[in-house]
Image (cartoon, rainbow, N blue to C red):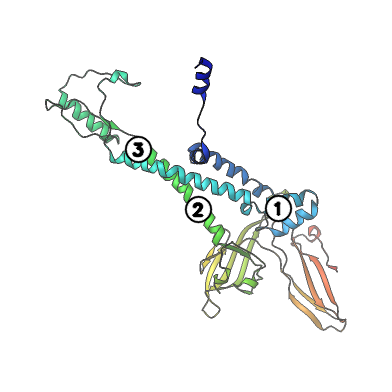
Amino acid sequence: MSKKAQGDKQAAQPSLGIVGWARWIWRQLTSMRVALMLLLLLAVAAIPGSVWPQRPVSPELVRNYLRENPTLGPWLDRLGIFDVYASPWFAAIYLLLMISLVGCLIPRIKVHFGALKEQPPKAPQRLGRLAAHHEVVVAAPREDVLAAARSVLKRRGYRLRAEEPDADGVVRDVAAEGGFLKETGNIVFHFSLLGIIVAVAVGHLFGWRGEAIIVEGQRFTSSVGAYDTLQPGPWADVDGSGNWTLTLDDLDVEFETEATGVQFGAPRLFDAQVSIASSPDDEPTKESLSVNNPVSLDGASVYLLGNGYAPIITVRDAEGNVTYSDAVRSSLRTTTTPPPGQSKSPAPTPSLASTALSCQPWRSTPSLAPRAPSRPG
């Protein structure tokens, strides 16, 4: 056989096959390097959720964006940019990260706990072969030196190997090792991260989010049709969300009066006094509801998101008879610009009369107060 044939024969490598490739992909996916890359990719993928409005949070802002950007808006909508956290590509990164963390942690836990059960390795016979070593001559009995070394190492948190006398019955070395607390903390951190990921996924699958605008003095009863917007999770049981009631007794809002520019007039404090009950027949209890201070009712957390205006509009006909009188809800106030509102009232003819209005906060100086008259529609 020629040398060339022998070289070709030695260079031939066996093919991995389906099982080999699957095993290689699994090892790559469950490596800590890939887990960190997926975590970084998840953080980058979440950026569009902060740049563009999200449909579950602000459907009105999404509609406005689509109307103002007729070319770019539909393409972004196809890519799931307006619902990033429920898009297929975000869910794929999320799932891969969870699998990677599980596959990475389980082998590390087995190795870690196995090392905890075993004794530290024996001290090497030749310390000079170690990369880091130091020799010191101590003028003291060997037993005292070994006892002092064991005491210092134990006080510093090292795991000590049990004393093993040699053939002459003499203990000649001390063996200890450390670093297990660091590895334990590392595992606990990654398990905490995995717990957060699983909790968010469970909340998305089984949770639901509803929004309702409540006027001062009105009572809200939780039901599917009572919410202005409702976004249930894929496996959420919205019908079993309870039949609790909430009455808005009073809403106190403080506005910025000292700052200048766009911050002038911005709300600084929301404080709602509410009466809540687990069912319409129960006796209500008084609670205080504010931003980041929710009230829990039958497993649901009720948050205060914002404030708005609800002016009482009274419509009279030519003879002075009241044809309509009620509080008109406007959109929630999200900026310093007051939101618009609309009302419909019966007219003398079979048709309806509609009114579009813009409510402006009144300032103490009448000459500086904004004027926004109603516009009949």
Residue 59 percent coordinates (x, y):
70, 59
* Residue that badge 2 annotates: 198
Of marks 3 and 1, which one's residue comes earlier in the chain?
Answer: 3
What's the residue type where badge 3 is placed? Answer: Phe
Q: Of helix, strand and loop, which one carries label 2? A: helix
* Distance Cα–Cα, label 1 vs label 2: 42 Å
* Distance Cα–Cα, label 3 vs label 1: 56 Å
* Residue that badge 1 annotates: 264
Is the residue 149 above or below the residue 59 in the image?
above
- Closer to the eye: label 2 or 3: 2
Is the residue 202 above or below the residue 98 in the image?
below
Q: Is the residue marked by circle 3 packed among few (<14), some (14-19), or many (20+) residues within 10 Å?
A: some
* Distance Cα–Cα, label 2 vs label 3: 27 Å
Choose between 179 and 167: the one closer to the eye: 167
Choose between 7 and 80: the one closer to the eye: 7
Is the residue 107 above or below the residue 234 in the image?
above
Of marks 1 and 2, which one's residue comes earlier in the chain?
Answer: 2
- The image quarter containing residue 227 is bottom right
Side (left or right) of 42 relative to 347: left
Q: Of helix, strand and loop, which one carries label 1? A: loop
Q: What mark, if any, has residue 252 been given in the picture?
A: none
Side (left or right) of 93 relative to 352: left
Residue at point 77%, 54% (across, down): 66
- The image quarter containing residue 231 is bottom right
Residue 177 percent coordinates (x, y):
30, 32
Of marks 2 and 3, which one's residue comes earlier in the chain?
Answer: 3
Q: Is the residue marked by circle 2 packed among few (<14), some (14-19), or many (20+) residues within 10 Å?
A: some
What's the residue type where badge 1 is placed? Answer: Phe
Residue at the outermost top position = 3
* Residue that badge 3 annotates: 180
Q: Of helix, strand and loop, which one carries label 3? A: helix
